[in-house]
Amino acid sequence: YIYKGAYGWKLGVFLATCVSMLGSALGAVICFLLGRYLMRDQVRKWIRKYPLFDAIDVAAAEHGLRIMAMLYLTPILPLGPLSYICGTTSMSLPHFVIAKVAALPLMLLYVFIGASAGTLIGKKKSDGLSTDQVKSIEENETLIVSGILLSAVSIACITHYIRKELNKILEQQKRQ
C-alpha cells in the first residue's frame, strides 16, 4: 500500500514485490542453513512428531526442486519450518533458492492485495469526485476483486494437488 502510494501502481507493486521476495528468500536461506548445520537433530525431532512433515521430508529428498516449488505456492503450510526441514534433506542450496522463485506469484498476489487496499477502501470516499472518476474506481475494484478471486482459486487448486501428492507419499511410507 505504501509503495503504491509513493511510486504509483506499476513501480510501487514492482518494488514492493522485489523487497518482499528478497526478505523472504533471505529468511528462508537462513532457516535452511540453520537446519542443515546447527539444528539438524532438533529439526529431525520435529519431523518425527508430524507425519505430514515426514512426507515432505521424503518428497523433498527425492524431488526437491519440483516439490519445493509447488509447496511455496501453498499458503497453508508454514514455510519457516519447511525451510528448516529442507536443510536436513539432500536438497542443494541452489535448488532451494531456485524453488523460492516459484513463490513469486503468491508474493505478487500479497503485494497486489496490499496495494489494492486503498482502492477498495477509498471507494466509500467518493464525495467530490466526478462520475467518471467514481466509475473508474468501480471498474478497478471489479478488476481487483476478480484478480484476487482468480488467484485464490488457482492457489487452492495447487494446494489440492500438493495435498494429494503428499498423501500418496504417506501411503507409500505406511506400506513399507
Image (cartoon, rainbow, N blue to C red):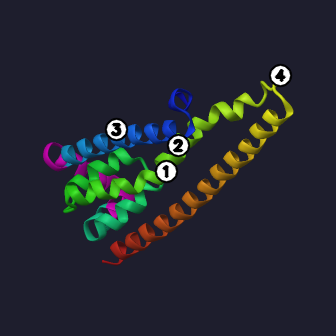
Does residue 75 appear in this view?
Answer: no
> In front: mark 1 or mark 4?
4
Query: Which is more toward the observer, 23 or 30?
Result: 23
| Amino acid on which disc 3 is placed | Gly
Q: Earlier in the sequence, mark 1 or mark 4?
A: 1
Q: Callout 4 environment at 10 Å: few (<14), some (14 to 19), or many (20+)? A: few
Query: Which is more toward the observer, 12 or 51?
Result: 12
Residue corresponding to mark 1 = 106
- Which residue sits at x=52%, y=43%? 110
Residue 51 in magenta stretch = yes
- Which residue sits at x=25%, y=66%? 61
What secondary structure is the magenta-colored segment mainly? helix
Query: Which is more toward the observer, 173 or 73?
Result: 73
How many marks can you see?
A: 4
| Amino acid on which disc 2 is placed | Tyr
Q: Earlier in the sequence, mark 2 or mark 4?
A: 2
Whole-percent x, y for residue 55 in the image: 35, 64
- Which residue sits at x=60%, y=54%? 152
Residue corresponding to mark 2 = 110
Whole-percent x, y for residue 170 in the image: 39, 69
Name the residue furthest top.
128
Q: What is the secondary structure assignment of the residue under circle 1?
A: helix
Question: In which quadrant is the N terminus drawn?
Answer: top right
Q: Which mark is residue 23?
A: 3
